[in-house]
Amino acid sequence: MSILKLEDVGYRYKDAPKDQYVFKNINYEFEQGKTYAIKGKSGSGKTTLLSLITGLEKCTEGNVLYDGKNLKKMNLDKYRNTDIGIVFQSYNLLPRLTAIENIILSMDVSKVKIKKKKEKALELMKSVGLSEEQAKRKILKLSGGEQQRIAIARSLSYNPKIIIADEPTGNLDKETETEILNIFTRLAKEENKCVIIVTHSQNVCDRVDCIYDLEKK
Amino acid sequence: MYILKNSLISIIRNKGRNILIGIIVLVIACSATVTLSIRNTANNLVKNYEEAHDIIATISFNRQQLSEKFEGGEDAIKNNIEAFNEIEAITLDNVKNYGDSSYLKNYYYVYSTSLNSDTLTKATDKYEYEVEDKQTTTSTTTSTTGGENAGGRMPMGGPGGGGERHTFTNRNTTTIITRTKETFQSGRNLTGDFELDGYSSYDGMTNFIDGTYKITDGEMITDFENFECAISSELATLNQINVGDTITFKNPNTEATYDFLVKGIYKDNSNDDDSANMYSPSANTIIVGSKIIEKLVSDDSTLVTNITPSFILQNEEAITPFSEEVKAKGLNEYYTVNTNLEELKTATKSIENVKTFATTFLAITLIIATIVLLVINMINIRERKYEIGVFRTIGVSKFKLTIQFVLELLIVSLIALCIGAVIGTFLSKDIGNSLLQNEIEATQVANEQILDNFGKGGKPMDLERATVQVQAINEIDAVVDFKVILQLLAIGLGLTIVSSLASMISIQRFSPLTILKERS
Ligand SMILES: Nc1ncnc2c1ncn2[C@@H]1O[C@H](COP(=O)(O)OP(=O)(O)OP(=O)(O)O)[C@@H](O)[C@H]1O
Ligand SMILES: [Mg+2]
């Protein structure tokens, strides 16, 4: 059974001309325990699609179903803080907080009960290759790659069923990219997550179970 | 819980902005405390004044109405006096009847009459003594002699013995025509040498309360039913009377005598007497209890008395119903019920002005403060758009986010409010006291002196206003009280909520994606 399903999804920005859809008639299905790639060139609408999947925007046409339920009828705040973990292209971390505080904040916000938040957060950071010393640093004192790992750790902190990441390896060297991809693969295989990676990189596409190409409309 | 935690972290991590907001709130709190406490003190002063100075209704004769009704011209005088005598004067029974009213807190009266005395010399500018009349007249002299009134006063209301003698001399025959003149006098004038003012209670002794009269030796009468009295220092000096002496008065009609024990000697401090008399108008006034006058009247019902009642009203609203009630009870149409309300309002006017100023000042401060805080908040929200976007994308609801932002402002405001209130409290003692100094002092001095005026020193006495004033003064001393703190809190809360409206609205209308995209 698919955990996430896109039915005839289409999207047009409000200020765009009437017929100019970013994309149209998209029918994708995602299952737990698998890794997916949404592929497309820059400007093809990858981030836009991600915002539909995460409920930050409502689709102009069609529906997004999570676990059989229409997103339009769900409490989207709860959906975002419990069911889906998002890693944004621009990380979207709070610069005034330290790395670990960003992760704990997501745990606090989540409806999921989590014990020993600090230990769990440190553990998560270790699993994405960050040290305890880095955990205590403010976000802006970390490199882009390190911020990206924190964003990943944050998306995992409340143990959601779906992880969706926008260009998670865009700023990373080949070695680190492989490392991150290993983490995602492990999450799908060992923890039965549904991992969706939005990317334009062929290297990523080679590693996933299933590829959806946005440009093939 | 995490909302509060986020607020606290945000406050600490955004020191600069929050210190700025804090300083603004602090300044507002400070000036609000000062103005509120001035308002409060002014209120207390007015309340204190109103408690110490009751609304008193008096009944007075309406001369204007009389003159409108009565005929004019010299010939009319006699008729007018007769008509005037027919208008029933207020009696003690009337006063007691009027006083039995639910609109009143209390009432008191001065029941007066006048007596003569064989042993006391009246304090007066006139000094009469007998001389032998050695008048010689010759039959050839033509002279006109003016009539001389007999010493002493005429019995009231009746024809007097004054007259004029005109002597016309002819060469041969002498005709003496003696014309007697009838003196007409109102039946209400007290005619004895000494006026006995019978007070029904200490509260009626307004002259002693306001300090016009002051007991300088001995004390005020202690019993309103005993033959005790307080006399003026002028009379005491003239007749060499000391406290503890007994003085004797005589009813001018019946010659019956009454002995009074002198309990105290008072001094009349009034300096508004612009007549050039040797003695003050109160020199021959004897202060006694009202029951004494009642005894005198029961001995001789023809004794002319005068009663001046004062009705202490419950409140301002009782004025009209009380005067209507009194009229319904049969007060003569020539009498009107008057109150001292206008006088009281004039007295508190300067305090009311200070209060109005404080209120206006407070309102302006609050309006400016609200605008400034609103602007700061709007700028603040613009700066924090990205932060809001992040919170929304990780699944913080609009409601919780709004609470968090309002809470941040509220915590900063409350801390600043407390510091401001403390500083304001110190300032308001000085500012408030200097603004209202005269008023405060006036009440304090008055209070300390009242008991002294009665010659009672520290002794307790049955005087209502002395106790009322002591209480009120204590209230005034506490310049910033609980009420001010509550008002301040309400202001702080209102200010925070109004000024965080900007953040509330923008969070509601917020699209997280657009904001996050703007950033990238
Ligand atoms: N707010 C907007 N209003 C109108 N058009 C927009 C808006 N945001 C994006 N677009 C357009 O929609 C298209 C898709 O944008 P999107 O950000 O989804 O691209 P992307 O595939 O994520 O690109 P990249 O790989 O560079 O991140 C672009 O052509 C862009 O110009
Ligand atoms: Mg993109």
Image (cartoon, coloured by chain):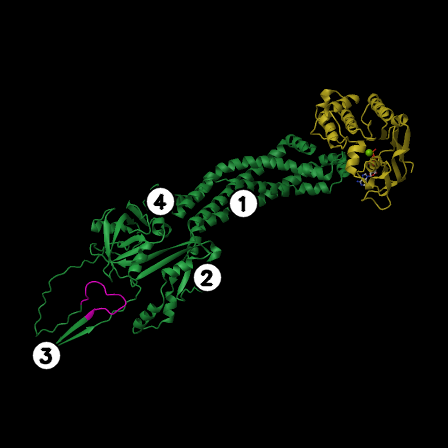
Chain colours: A yellow, B green
Q: Are marks 1 and 2 in contact (CB under 8 Å)?
A: no
Task: From the viewer's side, name the closer residue of B410 and B308.
Answer: B308
Disc ID at residue A192: none
Q: Which residue is situated farthest in the bottom direction here?
A: B172
Chain ID for label 1? B
Chain ID for label 2? B
Q: Amino acid at mark 1?
A: Leu
Disc ID at residue B325: 2
Q: Amino acid at mark 3?
A: Thr
Q: Which residues are magenta?
A: B148-163
Q: Secondary structure at mark 4?
A: helix
Q: Which callout, 1 or 4, points at the residue further toward the start of the chain?
A: 1
Q: Which residue is mark 3?
A: B173
Q: Which residue is situated farthest in the front direction here?
A: B299
Q: Which residue is mark 1?
A: B362
Where residue B109 appears, as percent x and y from the top left, is: 37, 56
The residue located at (26%, 65%) in the rendering is: B156
Asked if labels 1 and 2 share a chain, the reply is: yes
Q: Is residue A128 above or below residue B92?
A: above
Q: Which callout, 4 or 2, points at the residue further toward the start of the chain?
A: 2
Q: Which residue is mark 4?
A: B451
Q: Nearer the viewer, mark 3 or mark 1?
A: 3
Q: Secondary structure at mark 2?
A: helix
Majority secondary structure of magenta residues: loop
Q: Are marks 1 and 4 in contact (CB under 8 Å)?
A: no
Quadrant where the N terminus of chain A lies? Answer: top right
